[in-house]
Image (cartoon, grey):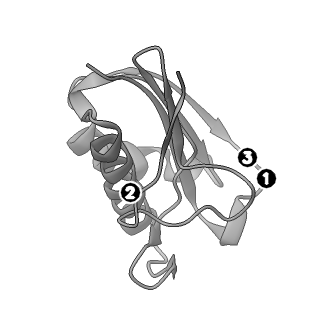
Amino acid sequence: MMKVVATEKAPKALGPYSQGYVHGGILYSAGQLGINPEVNDIDSDTIEGQTDQACKNIGEVLKEAGTDFDHVLKTTCFLSDMANFGAFNEVYAKYFTSKPARSCFAVKELPKGALCEIEVIAAVE
């Protein structure tokens, strides 16, 4: 059985998709930008600030799904500029301490002019 994951503590979807789905004990999340859900917009212009907010948003989706950062199996990260890779990693490492498998890509651009986006696959026990 599939379960939709939806929380008001993370930004609403910018399009026709869900924040995540749980199926077979696995959470598949949509990508999270550095959108502050209180103002429904990106309120930082730095990679550090946006990465921190994206991670907080992922944390809320994980919590709503009944799991946490320690159960993340895989992340996919998108950066608008690979020059931000080091600074992104410094913030990312504070949240993903279990060091899940990861792919990281530079992309031409992200929605809302964001500097980064993070999606996760996590075990739900």
Say which residue label 3 marks: 107
Residue 99 picture location, percent across and down: 29, 23
- Mark 2 vs mark 1: in front: 2
* Label 2 to label 1: alpha-carbon separation: 23 Å
**Residue type at mark 2?**
Asn
Within the image, what quadrant is residue 39 found in?
bottom left
Element under disc 1: loop
Front tag of 3 and 2:
2
Q: Earlier in the sequence, mark 3 or mark 2?
A: 2
Q: Residue at x 24, y 42 (%)?
A: 95
Left or right of 105 on screen, residue 36: left
* Mark 3 residue element: loop
Estimate the x, y position of residue 72 in percent, counting from the top left: 34, 26
Work out whether 62 lies above or below 124. below
Return the residue nearer the eye: 25 or 106.
25
Q: Dot 2 lies on which element? A: helix
Where is mark 1, residue-wise?
108
Residue nearest the viewer, comparing 94 with 111: 111
Q: Which numbered circle lies on residue 57?
A: 2
How far is disc 3 from disc 1 in space, using C-alphas?
Answer: 4 Å
Residue 112, image quadrant? bottom right
Q: Earlier in the sequence, mark 2 or mark 1?
A: 2
Q: Position of 117 compared to 124: left or right?
A: right
Residue positioned most to the top? 24
Q: Is there a contact, CB below 8 Å, between mark 3 and mark 1?
A: yes
10 Å crowding of disc 3: few (<14), some (14-19), many (20+): some
From mark 3 to mark 2, how far is it between C-alphas? Answer: 21 Å
Quarter holding residue 92: top left
Q: Are marks 2 and 1 in contact (CB under 8 Å)?
A: no
